[in-house]
Image (spheres, grey):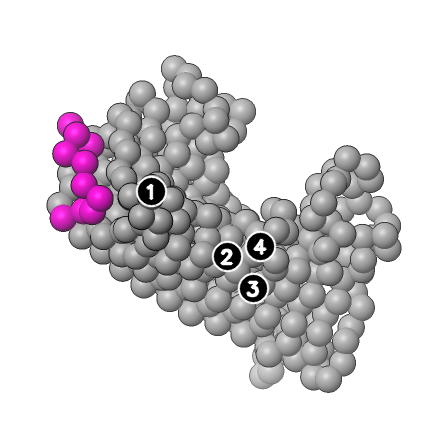
Amino acid sequence: MCGSNESTTIPTLLAPDGQTYYVTQTEFKGPCKSNNVHVQILGTILAPLRVDWGACSRRWLSFTGVDGLIVDGSGVIDGQGEDWWGDLTTGCTGRPTALLFERCDGLQLSGLTHINGPGFHIYVVHSKNITISNVTITAPENSSNTDGIDISNSKGVTISDSIIGTGDDCIAIKGGTQFLDISNVQCGPGHGISVGSLGEDGQEEYASDIHVWNCSINGATGGVKIKTWAGGKGIVRGVIFEHIIVNQTNYPIHIDQHYYGSKEQPQAIKVDNVTFNDIHGSCTTENAIVLDCAKIGCTDIKLNEIGITSVDPNKPASTICNNVQGTGTNFLPGNSSCFH
C-alpha cells in the first residue's frame, strides 16, 4: 500500500464489514510514494489479550511518517484492555497506546468506534494539520489511564462532533500543542478536557492558542481544566473555554498548578490569557470554580457569564482563587476577592 504511486486512485487498505481481524502489534511506516493513503475499517480490529502480548510495547497500532493518511469507516477498534487496567508491578510497566500517529501531517481520522484501549485510545504526536471527527471512544469509568485523545507537540489540530467517555481525560492537551480547536464533543464519564499535565520533574513545556467550545461534560470528575506540576518551566497561553455545559461534574472549572499535590517551588509554568466564558450547569460538590495558581501567579484570567450550582444542598457551590490576576463578570458562585 505505502509503495504504491498510483496517481488516479488512492491506495486503500480495507477491513471489510462483518469480519473480526485479530491484529498483533503493528507499525505502518512511511514515507509513502502516494500523496494520500487510505485505511478503511468496516469490520472489527481486535487487539491481543495482555497474556498474549509478547514483548512489552508502548503501542499497538502505530503509523509513523505517513503524510496524507485517511483512516475512517464504520468499524470498531477494540483494544481488549481490561487486563491492563489493574496492577502493572509485574511484566510490562506501561499501558500501550491503542492507536498512535507520529509525524503524520494531514491526518484525517473519522467515523470509527474505539473501545477498551489498554492505555490511551488515540495519540497524535509531532504532527500538523490534523482533523479528527465523528469518532466514538468508550471505556469503563474505572479503567486506568485510558485517555480518549491525547495531542502532543502538534500544530493545527481540529477535533469535532465526537462522543468520548473513558476512565481518564476525554481529551488531554499535552506539551508542544499549538492552534487546537475542539468543538461539539460530548465528554463523560472521565476526567474532562484538560490542558496538561505539564512540567513534571521540572520539564519545560508550553501550550498555546487552544479553543474549546460548544462541548458538554456529563458525570465526569473534571470539567475544563489546566493542570501543571510545581517546579515546571514554560507557559500556557491563549486558551478559551466557552459555551460549555457541565452536568453533575466535580471541578467544572479548574486551574491546578499543584498537580497531584506537588509542593510550591520557586519556579512554575506561567498561565496567561485564559478565558472561561458561558459555562453553566451543576457540580457534585462545592468545587464549582477552583483557580489554584502558583505564587508566580496566573495572569489575565477571565471569568464571564458563569453559572454553576451544586446538586448537594449540604455542600453549596463555591469559588476558590489563589494567586490569580484577571477579571470576572456575572459569575456564580461569586467571590469578590478572587482577582487583584
Instruction: Give the residue at mark 3.
Output: 137
Q: Is residue 39 above or below residue 316?
A: below
Which of the labelled discs sits on residue 189, or is there none? 2
Q: Earlier in the sequence, mark 1 or mark 2?
A: 2
Instruction: Give the residue at mark 4.
Output: 141
Q: Is residue 265 above or below residue 180?
A: above
**In terms of secondary structure, where does tag 3 sit?**
strand
Q: Where does residue 8 sit, x and y in percent of width and height?
A: 58, 83
Which of the labelled discs sits on residue 315, or is there none? 1
Q: Residues within 10 Å of mark 3 (few under 14, many from 20)?
A: many
162 left or right, relative to 179: right
Q: Earlier in the sequence, mark 4 or mark 2?
A: 4
Magenta stretch encompasses residue 56: no
Q: Nearer the viewer, residue 112 or 127?
A: 112
Quadrant for the N terminus in the image: bottom right
In the rendered structure, which segment of residues is drawn in magenta?
330-340
Which of the labelled discs sits on residue 103, or is there none? none
